[in-house]
Image: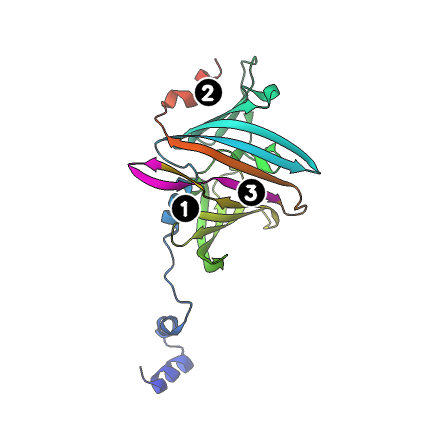
Amino acid sequence: MAASALTKCLREGSPLIAAVASCFSPFAFASPVVDDLMKASDRYRGGLAVGVTWSITINSVEDGETTVSKYDVRAKGFNALAECVNPPRCKGEVVLFNNRNLWFLKPGVKKPVAISARQRLSGQAANGDIASTNYARDYEASFDKEVMMGGTAAYQLNLKARDKSVTYDKIRYWISKDKKLALKAEFLTLSGELFKSAIFEYGNSLVSGGKKIPFVSRMVIVDAAFPANKTIIKYESPREESHDDSIFNINNVAR
């Protein structure tokens, strides 16, 4: 297009101007397929349709005091079973994720207690943080912009809860452009105020479907108002395993 023709289009507001301008813009890029991004990032944090097993150690610092707990987690699709193995006073306690329903069970107590994904489990970690990785299902996501994060090109998404039972109302979410790994999340109130954030690291891997894929190794959650209050969730020994659906049935767990 000749310079004079381009000038005319700019002046007259031609319908072609957006396409023409994008061709000349150094920041031009195609919007990602958000649903595919969400599903991929979930996969690397445990959201696999097949069975997966891992252990987590939760270190929480609140007001200068440190607490440590450890859970063994078995997950499959939208279900998960997290059993506490440490400290001894909590050993055998279970948090069961059955679809969007959460239950807490304690040794010696036959009746399970319905709990919320939003309730605190330890420090900054909510119940939903330990095994709920199905952001693609639980949140309506929209593309915001492309940014650089520590030298990594990433997509910034805005997530809005599809259901009141999920862990957070709103999330700002960053997913790496190349590997589709979730890099950071900012958790927001319904009014859009930041109250805590998390970063993700991927020092683990597992074999799924015959292919080696990255798997989350650390999630660091920080209180926005009091940054010294933080919780580090360390993921260990992730592996693909076959889990029968019956282990996620509350009636079987409660026996």
Res. 250 mark: 2
Residue 57 at what x, y percent from top left? 54, 32
Q: Percent position (x, y) of residue 124?
A: 61, 38
Q: Earlier in the sequence, mark 2 or mark 3?
A: 3
Residue 119 appears in the figure: no
Q: CA distance from mark 1 to mark 3?
A: 20 Å
Identify residue for label 3.
Answer: 220
- Report which residue position mark 1 lands on: 38
Q: Nearer the viewer, mark 1 or mark 3?
A: 3
| 41 on left or right of 58 | left
> Horizontally, is 70 left or right of 21 in the view?
right
Q: Is residue 231 visible?
A: yes
Position of the N terminus, as image quadrant, is bottom left
Q: Counting residues from the N terminus, which is met first, the one under dot 1 or under dot 3? A: 1
Segment colored magenta: 207-222
Q: In percent of the image, x 36 and y 61: which residue is there?
A: 30
